[in-house]
Image: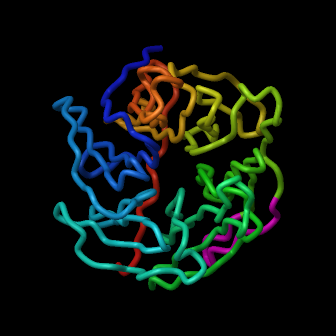
Amino acid sequence: MKIEKIADYACNTGEGCIWHPLEKAVYWTDIPAGKFFRYDPKTNTHKQVYEGRQVAAFTIQADGSMLLFQDKGTVSLWKDGKIAKTIVEDIPLERDTRFNDVCACPEGRVYCGTMPVRTPEKVILRDAKLYRLDRDASVHQILAGIHNSNGSGFSPDQKTFFYTDTGMGIIYRFDYDRASGELTRQRNFTMVPPAPASEGKPDGMTVDAEGNVWGARWGGGCVVCYGPDGVEKFRVKLPTPNTSCPCFGGENLDELYVTTAGGHERDKLGPDAGALFRITGLNAKGKPEHFSRIGI
């Protein structure tokens, strides 16, 4: 196994990495900075491609364009290197917060979670939620009472949806109905205990071709691989504590890219905080992420 630091923009909150299969490139974001970046493994080059309003996460549209999930519940279409149009202007309940993590489903809908609204003392004033963005661009709230909506993904057989509530320390699993987009039978997939604190909290995640769930641990400095039964198989340590989001990429989907956070606190979190890493030699392979098909 090999761990490489691929790009270092000292991201405050590096997040949302996704493999673009048509461009064969990785995109990721620094949420508070309102920036996102692109890495081309063929040329081993990377660059900042956007600066503006916050972008928390992306999906890849079937035509190769991208959806940007932003603050205030805004969803924008990114095409030809710029924001081409607004798909969703805002969500009234989310005007003082933002999206966090998102995931396209087999039918091209998008499940998109939000952040809670907190006081300066971190007391939750309004909970986070999970929405479904349908192909006609209509938005439907499907879950409430969430402490911090985070990573999600689908099993290889497309029957199970995994969803993370970081605040609760739980990755849930749901039955997924492909025809309707409904999620039912919520139950725990795995739970990270609150102690010791060095275990961190579950953050972004991805699902591989064998149905294993790979979950980043915010504060835990690692990515944990769980079997389809929710039991930990092994973990990969990274040289900085706030690991935030993994995705499989590369020609054979056998490279794991991982975003990290804390570039503004390197005096406490170390010189690698906020960098993008690549892990190879894992003997694991990802599955293609589903394209979103909003408006297509």
Residue 257, visible in the rendered structure: no
Q: Up-down: is 205 above or below 237?
A: below
Residue 282, visible in the rendered structure: yes
Colouring: rainbow
**Camera-side residue: 150 or 190?**
150
Q: Position of residue 51 (x, y in %)?
A: 26, 56
Q: Position of residue 23 (x, y in %)?
A: 23, 49
Q: Is residue 45 left or right of residue 268?
A: left
- The quadrant holding residue 223 is top right
Query: Which residue is rendered at x = 46% and y = 44% of the image?
Result: 13
Q: Position of residue 100 (x, y in %)?
A: 53, 58
Quadrant that contains the C terminus: bottom left
Residue 179 lies within the magenta run = yes
Q: Is residue 179 left or right of residue 227?
A: left
Which region shows up in magenta?
A: 176-186
Q: Up-down: is 189 above or below 269?
A: below
Query: Which residue is rendered at x = 59% and y = 50% of the image?
Result: 151
Query: Which residue is rendered at x = 45% and y = 18% of the image?
Result: 281
